[in-house]
Amino acid sequence: MENEGRTTVSDDLAYAPATELAARIRRRDLSPVELIDAVITRIEARNPSLNALVFTAFDEARERAQQAERALTSGDALGPMHGVPTAIKDLFDFKPGWPATLGGVRALRDFSVPAYCTYAERMEAAGAVLVGKTNSPVMGFRGTCDNYLFGPSRNPFDTTKNTGGSSGGSAAAVADGLLPLAEGTDGGGSIRIPAAWCGLYGYKASFGRVPYTARPNAFGALNPFLFEGPLTRTVDDAALALDVLAGYDDRDPFALDDSTSFAGATRRSISGWRIAYSPDFGVYPVDRRVAAVVEQAVQAFQEAGAVVEEVDLTFDYDQRELSDLWCRLILPLNIEGLEGLKAQGLDLLGEHRDSFPPEYLRWIDEGFRLSAQDVLRDQRMRTHVYDQIQQVLRSHELLVTPTLAALPVENADDGNTVGPSSIEGVEVDPLIGWCLTYFTNFSGHPAASIPAGDVGGLPVGMQLIGRRYADADVLAASGAYERLRPWHDAYGRCAGRPLN
């Protein structure tokens, strides 16, 4: 009977927003211990069919929930996430003593980093309870979620399909009601890509809004711009998470010294705004079914009082040249990580070379051949992308596009799932070339993916891009859209899926 009761509590709480859970805990309507027990019960029952979490720390989570329970009666100050469960990503995201496989690298099965990532550090400081780490691809170097150590994460809308990456395990956990929110990181779209394929809200803040405290290279987040942020089911939850994560940190040379609160932004009106809409960002082939969903979804902004105008963006490079640019830009950071591990006695490109997919090795080999002239050329190309986005946003509050050009792909059985290699008869890079997301990692603009609808039950995302540092604008437009086109009933398809 006790197990039956716990399962019922788990089901009741599974899709409650983080804002609601935090409020109930503060009112003492909900016990943090009861909540963490319910979360653990649901993870144990449902995670085996998803492969969302690849490491769990349930004893540690229960102890922290007990501490949160005691704080409720002791008069201690309570953080905005007090008692709310969450998880961090198993990539460049750390908590001391926890494994860090850098995306399922087999040779790093027992590796750990004695440091905190910003998400873990600030979420715990706000009272959240970390339950474990979520799956991602090797070194985050693709838009799907799969690796040789743990295998693919499975999409809770259709478990034969991939979640998208690189924050795919986090997305699966949130969409399936295992957690109210989870960490994503975003170097080319890795928050927004799985948000689109798993029917979630994924938010990437302006560069500098959320500190990035990497060492030994504090400047590593520049090429391309790297971000930490939340994957949630509601816009309000993302705003709450941003309030927790944002704020100055002197360890980050680019951290914004700004105490703005974003929780109220989701209720702002967007009446009178000019919103630019591009169905393909000027260069991408987009699956016509995806395009049709987004074209219909963008009309919601007109209902909210905004003026929606289709715009043309003109690039000097085609989409394949631009996806190759992203791959080259992120190579130095990857090489630095590999060389750092080599200095610690882990020669991953030598005796452990078979830990990496061939597509990754091809690019790493190219990275070692890049010259200073190559780097300068790439930064000029990147500047061109920035200029095209800025040109649109000078006269519009927002730029809207599809998040992705394709629907979720089938999971492979060899640990090496990739995206589509062609869309509408046009060849694209299967690693990242179908993702309309990485342009804002070149430019640093705030961006979100919001659920736009579905094709045959598979989610489609719509990308909202704001002016530099105008995070409140992106959240305002997202909140307006959510009120007019609520998507939350769609999670019933995840909740009702067979567990096999």
Image (cartoon, grey):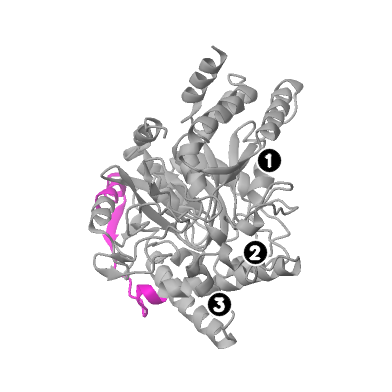
Looking at the rendered structure, the secondary structure element under dot 3 is helix
Q: Nearer the viewer, mark 2 or mark 3?
A: 3
Instruction: Name the residue located 72 percent from the left edge and 63 percent from the top edge.
Output: 215
Name the quadrant of the C terminus: top left
Left or right, residue 239 beside residue 489: right
Q: Are marks 3 and 1 in contact (CB under 8 Å)?
A: no
Dot 3, crowdedness within 10 Å: few (<14), some or many (≥20)?
Answer: few
Q: Residue under label 1, please give it.
A: 124
Q: Residue under label 3, please give it.
A: 365
Q: Are marks 2 and 1 in contact (CB under 8 Å)?
A: no
- Whole-number angstrom distance, CA of label 2 to CA of label 3: 30 Å
- Whole-number angstrom distance, CA of label 2 to CA of label 1: 23 Å
Of 144 and 386, which appears nearest the observer? Answer: 144
What kind of residue is marked 3? Asp
In this rendering, the answer to whether 174 lies above or below 256 is above
**Which region is colored magenta?**
295-321
Magenta highlight on residue 311: yes
Q: Nearer the viewer, mark 3 or mark 1?
A: 3
Asked where in the image residue 288 lies, by quadrant, the reply is: bottom left
Instruction: Name the residue located 59 percent from the left edge and 21 percent from the top edge.
Output: 30
Dot 1, crowdedness within 10 Å: few (<14), some or many (≥20)?
Answer: many
